[in-house]
Image: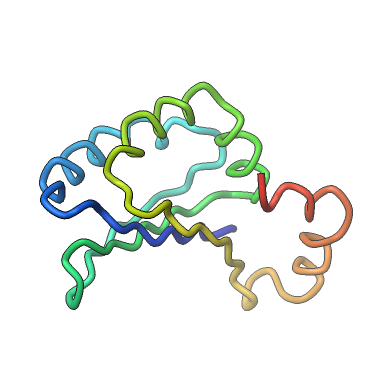
Amino acid sequence: MILEAATLYIKPGAINEFESTLRSAYGIISTMRGYLGHELYKCVENRDEYILLIRWNTIKDHAIGFRQSPEYKEWVELLQPYYDPEPSVKHYIDIRVGGREYERELWSGEAGKVTDP
């Protein structure tokens, strides 16, 4: 499993509209191959900051399957107007489950090329 972690900074005054739009955008991402679930957290110290966690079966499900799909374009069109600056997105593996062998496989060959689409 891959955990995608996106730090989102929302333009001041757009929080309520962003949250509503994001709820409707979940319908897009939840239909994608490899999507396992998501969580959204709002920062206590900075009300314009969120962390969006999305679980994917594989990194390719996110980096290729979703990011190269027409659904991704729709996702971006819906949410892009609220970001300031662009989200920071990183991918994580559970080392208790995947271990070092999976990590080496992930970053070798083609797998390493898809982490930064």
102 shown above or below 109:
below
Residue sitting nearer the eye, 57 or 87? 87
* Residue 90 at x, y percent in the picture: 55, 61
20 shown above or below 115:
above
Residue reaching furthest to the right: 109
Q: Residue at x 54, y 50 (%)?
A: 56
Q: Is residue 10 left or right of residue 64?
A: left
Count of picture labels: 0
Q: Residue at x 22, y 64 (%)?
A: 42
Q: Residue at x 43, y 58 (%)?
A: 6
Q: Residue at x 11, y 50 (%)?
A: 13
Q: Where does the N terminus fall, quadrant-wise?
A: bottom right
Q: Is residue 22 left or right of residue 36?
A: left
Residue sitting nearer the eye, 44 or 65? 44
Quarter of the image for residue 117 reads: top right
33 shown above or below 38:
above
* Residue 97 at x, y percent in the picture: 63, 71
Q: Is residue 86 left or right of residue 42?
A: right
The structure's colour scheme is rainbow
Residue sitting nearer the eye, 80 or 19? 80
Q: Is residue 117 left or right of residue 2?
A: right
